[in-house]
Image (spheres, helix red, strand yellow):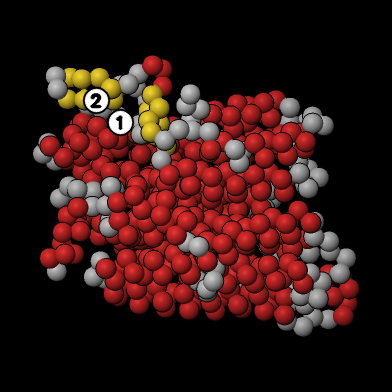
């Protein structure tokens, strides 16, 4: 029996339940319980397709077409969803330490987990759009729960622009439906391959890229995402960036499946690489200029999203693998960094110029945050080194050495602003009076344990990257763009 739908159905149903019992005394224990249940869900599905409503393959003449909505599970999707559920579980456990926790927060987190999981699993483009919209709404709702005026403004701007971006994506889905007669991504790809391209197809592709950029935080929507991360509570920002990374990966894979082996992808590839490089450079430069620690982390997230998109945009199996692997790694160490930023919430200041000497107050937390920063820079033996090295190898194999040089320069920039932040927050001397105030700050053991778990995973994947790479490569090998590979061999 295939229990694949439970990956989406369980968090979806429990989200509805929590929205009704949001003031109940049972919210905290139930939140802890569902947090542990989430870790089991990705393991319930059986590899292969799942057809909803008794539908399946139908034949029109000799042509096989998919009837109805279908979800598929493979090692790639399973790994992505397990990582997503792990971060979701950690965030839910940490939320129980908040006095003002309500069922509304738990409901929004679960709704986001269900919607992003559906975006990853679905092979139906309209079904993808529906859950894409739900994910956008839940992200804005989680930021609103921060309760500050800046959070309200950030969420409103995100939803306002999202109304337009979502409408553009829906119109793109409609155009592709009219050009292919199907909403199934596999059927669409086969139809586009055998039929001449029309302006309708070009328009659908353009609108798909707009939706991809908004959902994944690529230009021109990168500042909206950065503001969203900066205004949310730190442990909430951890789940927000996880949502964005996996939506970005899922939509980039859709573009590759639909257009990867069409002549139009030559131009599309250039556009996606340009957007990726701009995000990498912009995020790094803006992070270097920040004095607010949350904004620094937010712009770092934008830059790392560019790395992920770059790998997928290159289109070779190795590059796709590197992009996805970096997305998984980034989700882990960036969640650790956002969770570690909770210390600044406790002292009620995110301005790094007004902090200092916290190493004497929380040495364990300081050590864990330092490890997370080393992982984000790409220092061995942490996982960030492995995925960045793999991406650099993929860039060189694609005959784009200039991008490898750019990655090296940006990694130096990442080292500078990450070490600057660590010095200002933990090492810079502060007054005795200020130090006495900081000593009253207590960090929950839940935060320390969460950071420790994430960093153990970062270290483990840094030492044994083949555990993930060997699982993912057979899947991405089938997605690789054939004409890109041929052009590389002929050059």
Q: Is residue 69 visible?
A: yes
Q: Of the residues under marks 2 and 1, which one precedes in the sequence?
A: 2
Residue drawn at (62%, 62%), measured in percent from left and top?
455
Mark 2 surroundings within 10 Å by alpha-carbon count, few (fewer than 14), some (14 through 19), many (20 or more): some
Residue 160: percent from the left, percent from the top? 49, 43
Residue drawn at (81%, 76%), measured in percent from left and top?
360
Mark 2 vs 1: CB contact within 8 A = yes
Residue placed farthest to the bottom in the image?
429
Q: Is residue 80 left or right of residue 321?
A: right
Residue 398: percent from the left, percent from the top? 25, 66
Question: Mark 2 — residue?
Answer: 65
Helix, strand or loop under label 2:
strand
Looking at the rendering, which quadrant does residue 14 occupy? top right
Tally of numbered discs = 2
Q: Is residue 298 left or right of residue 262?
A: right
Helix, strand or loop under label 1:
loop
Image position of 73 with respect to 353: above or below: above
Looking at the rendering, which quadrant does residue 58 occupy? top left
Which of these two is toward me, 71 or 124? 71
Residue 124: percent from the left, percent from the top? 35, 31
Distance from disc 2 to disc 1, alpha carbons, whole Å, reads 8 Å
Residue 114: percent from the left, percent from the top? 54, 35
Residue placed farthest to the top in the image?
54
Q: Nearer the viewer, mark 2 or mark 1?
A: 2
What label sits on residue 184 in the rendered view?
1
Which of these two is toward me, 268 or 375? 375
Image position of 104 with respect to 225: above or below: above
Looking at the rendering, which quadrant does residue 341 occupy? bottom right
Residue placed farthest to the left in the image?
196
Q: Quadrant of the C terminus?
A: bottom left
């Amino acid at each position: 029996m295939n229990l694949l739908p439970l990956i989406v159905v369980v968090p979806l149903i429990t989200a509805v339940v929590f929205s009704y019992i949001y003031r109940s005394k049972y919210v905290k224990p139930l939140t802890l319980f569902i947090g542990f249940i989430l870790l089991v869900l990705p393991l319930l599905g059986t590899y292969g397709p799942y057809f909803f409503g008794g539908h399946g393959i139908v034949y029109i003449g000799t042509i096989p077409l998919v009837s109805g909505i279908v979800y598929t599970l493979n090692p790639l999707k399973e790994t992505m969803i397990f990582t997503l559920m792990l971060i979701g579980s950690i965030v839910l456990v940490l939320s129980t330490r908040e006095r003002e926790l309500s069922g509304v927060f738990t409901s929004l987190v679960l709704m986001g987990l269900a919607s992003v999981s559906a975006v990853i699993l679905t092979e139906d483009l309209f079904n993808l759009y529906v859950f894409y919209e739900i994910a956008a709404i839940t992200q804005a709702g989680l930021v609103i729960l921060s309760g500050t005026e800046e959070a309200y403004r950030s969420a409103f701007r995100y939803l306002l622009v999202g109304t337009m971006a979502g409408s553009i994506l829906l119109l793109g889905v409609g155009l592709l439906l009219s050009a292919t007669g199907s909403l199934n991504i596999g059927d669409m790809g086969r139809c586009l391959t055998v039929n001449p391209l029309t302006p309708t197809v070009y328009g659908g592709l353009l609108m798909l890229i707009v939706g991809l950029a908004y959902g994944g935080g690529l230009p021109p929507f990168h500042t909206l995402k950065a503001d969203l991360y900066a205004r949310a509570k730190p442990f909430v920002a951890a789940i927000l960036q996880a949502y964005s990374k996996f939506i970005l990966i899922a939509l980039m894979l859709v573009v590759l499946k639909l257009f990867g082996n069409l002549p139009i992808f030559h131009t599309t590839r250039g556009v996606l690489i340009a957007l990726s490089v701009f995000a990498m450079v912009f995020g790094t430069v803006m992070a270097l200029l920040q004095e607010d620690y949350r904004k620094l982390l937010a712009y770092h997230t934008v830059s790392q999203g560019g790395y992920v998109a770059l790998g997928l945009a290159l289109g070779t199996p190795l590059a796709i693998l590197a992009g996805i692997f970096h997305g998984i790694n980034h989700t882990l160490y960036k969640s650790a960094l956002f969770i570690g930023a909770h210390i600044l919430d406790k002292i009620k200041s995110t301005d790094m110029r007004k902090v200092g000497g916290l190493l004497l107050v929380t040495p364990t937390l300081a050590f864990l945050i330092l490890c997370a920063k080393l992982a984000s820079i790409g220092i061995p033996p942490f996982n960030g080194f492995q995925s960045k090295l793999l991406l650099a190898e993929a860039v060189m194999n694609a005959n784009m050495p200039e991008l490898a040089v750019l990655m090296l320069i940006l990694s130096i920039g990442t080292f500078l602003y990450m070490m600057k932040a660590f010095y200002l927050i933990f090492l810079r001397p502060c007054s005795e009076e200020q130090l006495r105030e900081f000593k009253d700050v207590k960090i929950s053991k839940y935060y320390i344990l969460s950071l420790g778990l994430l960093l153990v995973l970062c270290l483990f994947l840094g030492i044994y990257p083949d555990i993930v790479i060997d699982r993912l490569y057979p899947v991405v090998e089938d997605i690789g763009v054939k004409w890109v590979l041929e052009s590389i061999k002929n050059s």
